[in-house]
Amino acid sequence: MSTNSIWLNANYFSLLSFLTLSVASFQNATVYDVENTIFVDEFWGNYYGNKYRHFSEAWRLQSKEDARNMFYFAYDSYMKYAFPQDELNPIACTGRGPDISNPSNLNINDVLGNFSLALVDSLDTLAIMGNSSEFKKAVQTVVESVSFDLNSTVQVFEANIRVLGSLLSAHLIITDPKQPFGDMRPDGYNDELLSMAHDLAVRLLPAFEKTKNGIPFPRVNLKFGVPNDTITQTATAGAGSLLLEFGTLSRLIGDPTFENAARRAVDELWSRRDAKTGLVGVAIDVNTGKWMGRQSGLGAGADSFFEYLLKAYILFGEERDLHMFTEAIQSIKDHLRRGRKHCNEGQGDPPIYVNVDILSGSMVNTWIDSLQAFLPGLLVLSGDIEEAICCHALYYAIWRRYDALPERFNWQLKAPDVRFYPLRPELMESTYLLYRVTTSPHHPTIL
Ligand SMILES: *[C@@H]1O[C@H](CO)[C@@H](O)[C@H](O)[C@H]1NC(C)=O
Ligand SMILES: *[C@@H]1O[C@H](CO)[C@@H](O)[C@H](O)[C@H]1NC(C)=O
Ligand SMILES: *[C@@H]1O[C@H](CO)[C@@H](O)[C@H](O)[C@H]1NC(C)=O
Ligand SMILES: *[C@@H]1O[C@H](CO)[C@@H](O)[C@H](O)[C@H]1NC(C)=O
Ligand SMILES: *[C@@H]1O[C@H](CO)[C@@H](O)[C@H](O)[C@H]1NC(C)=O
């Protein structure tokens, strides 16, 4: 369920400083004109015009083998050099945990809570690889050695998607009577992972209980609750992407507390959408309940808010989640989308989704970020395949250019604005979903 990573916070803070900049200088930028066409010019080559490469069966099998080998290299090295710390520092080849000497090192401390994060995060992958002996062993190690009774201040969002989500998915894999990955049930398994998930969620609840308006604080200390001097600004995605895990936990243990808390946070954010444009901001102050700055967009700070609306509907079937999603995506198409009306035909440039002013819908900058590459996958899930294909083509063109996605790409300058790529999964998930849907007999093969 993980959609973001340790870098979320880096984005988040650069985003907050960005919001304080004047937006006026961006407002005259033309989104797309003939000179600035991204897809078909000497800079980009003709990726969009050339159809995708054919993904042969031999290549598919080789890619699968490559993925398996890469996973085992990472997993075995983590267990050898880093466990029980949270993750492996790949340069020094040593373990890495919270930076206790510097509590304000949020980039590290938001994610690494001294709970053997990489092992917890690997459980479902071991199952998907069909490695039942190692899966059972890893579950036993997690149950025996991981505890959340820790003086660690972590981000609610990160702990939710990576730890709570992993514990719940491993529990569901173990208890699924259909055994989709083989027999993954450790001897004597007694719902220990579910109990751990419950324990963790209880420790995250103070983030909700301490606010006046139900929008959770971004961080909690797992032992002491919300720190007195905590930062009160949270990303919309951080506060509004908890429902899949909290809802799953509530339904498994028969206690609606967690689902209710997550739903209330979504409702509170949703009720603050702009009356005219229907857009939500990318960051909000938990105390005042007011958006921070006026940017609205689909990348850092917002992304998984929309993703969770649709995935919650798919998982739980509650109509109101679908209604919110449908309305949100319509506002996005009305105000963020530039370019020609139809994806694959007609005059004008292929579509692009830009960052806009929440009140007016006017463009506020000329970059798209790597996180926004989740969008084609979301469009696939919503059944909007044509739009997904041309939206994916933009990211694919950038990927082909650099063999990576720059963290931020300036489509007007045709150059990266932020030049790192922390192995984000968004484009892969979108590509995978598009691959699954377009390999049906009615659609061409895609990669
Ligand atoms: C935007 O365009 C208007 C009208 O063409 C011009 O007066 C203004 O100086 C421009 N602003 C910027 C920031 O370039
Ligand atoms: C992590 O927890 C272990 C005990 O499980 C402790 O020995 C170690 O000091 C902790 N490390 C950090 C960085 O907090
Ligand atoms: C909890 O951790 C913080 C920072 O790592 C430290 O300053 C504080 O003394 C710890 N509190 C307790 C009760 O151990
Ligand atoms: C399962 O994982 C362990 C640890 O990486 C490895 O030694 C073993 O070969 C794997 N088994 C299979 C069947 O892949
Ligand atoms: C936080 O504030 C409460 C009430 O003002 C106080 O009792 C508590 O000691 C404070 N905690 C810390 C860690 O400063």
Image (cartoon, rainbow, N blue to C red):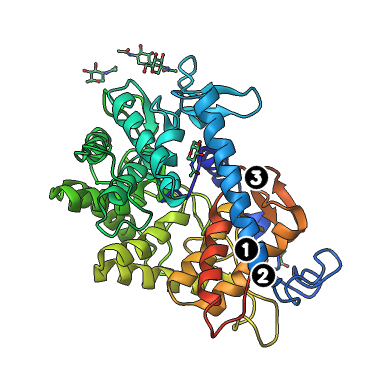
Where is 189 relative to 437, above or below? above
Specify which label sits upstream in the sequence, 1 or 3: 1
At label 1, which amino acid type do we have? Arg
Asked if residue 411 can be seen in this view, the reply is: no
Within 10 Å of disc 1 (Cα), the crowding (few <14, some 14-19, many 20+) is: few
Residue at mark 2: 56
Where is 143 relative to 309, above or below? above
- Residues at marks 1 and 2 touching, judged by CB atoms closer than 8 Å: yes
**Alpha-carbon span between mark 1 and mark 3:** 24 Å
**Alpha-carbon span between mark 1 and mark 2:** 6 Å
In the shown orientation, is residue 243 left or right of residue 370? left
Within 10 Å of disc 2 (Cα), the crowding (few <14, some 14-19, many 20+) is: few
At label 3, which amino acid type do we have? Tyr
Within 10 Å of disc 3 (Cα), the crowding (few <14, some 14-19, many 20+) is: some
Residue at mark 1: 60
**Alpha-carbon span between mark 3 and mark 2:** 28 Å
In the shown orientation, is residue 432 left or right of residue 278? right
**Residue 222 picture quarter:** top left
Q: Circle 2 — which element?
A: loop
Residue at mark 3: 421
Asked if residue 130 can be seen in this view, the reply is: yes
